Image (cartoon, helix red, strand yellow):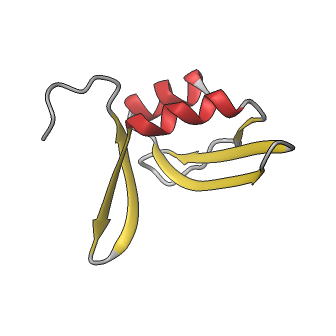
Amino acid sequence: MLLMAWRIIQGMSVKNVEINYTRERSFEASVVLESPHGVPDPPYKTTRIHDFALFRHVGIIEISGRPFFDGFYPLRIGDT
């Protein structure tokens, strides 16, 4: 998952996120990134729930009411 974060910092975009979670039983996450040229990477997969903490640093916005992940921001300076 750290490699995934590094690839986002380098300019890749989040194309697809799939999460499957069953309380006290299982956790699986799969993230597909896409290059600025539209070429997808193989999925980054994890079964470690602690890896999900990386998503608190992914920018979350809406454009014309549509969901959009944009960038990776590992440092938070002040509350805005």
Residue in view at x 67 percent, y 55 percent:
18
Q: Considering depth in this image, is 6 or 66 the residue closer to the camera?
A: 66
- Point out residue 3 in the picture as x, y percentages from the top left corner: 58, 23
- Point out residue 30 in the picture as x, y percentages from the top left corner: 70, 46
Residue in view at x 70 percent, y 42 percent:
42
Q: Residue lying furthest bottom in this view?
A: 64
Q: Residue lying furthest right in this view?
A: 25
Tell me the quarter of the image containing the N terminus: top right
Tell me the quarter of the image containing the C terminus: top left
Q: Residue lying furthest front in this view?
A: 24
- Point out residue 39 in the picture as x, y percentages from the top left corner: 56, 50
Taking 55 as reference, is 78 above or below it?
Answer: above
Residue in view at x 37 percent, y 74 percent:
66
In-image side of 21 versus 66 (left or right): right
In-image side of 72 versus 34 (left or right): left
| Res 43 quadrant in image | top right
Residue in view at x 39 percent, y 60 percent:
68
- Point out residue 36 in the picture as x, y percentages from the top left corner: 41, 47
Taking 62 as reference, is 57 above or below it?
Answer: above
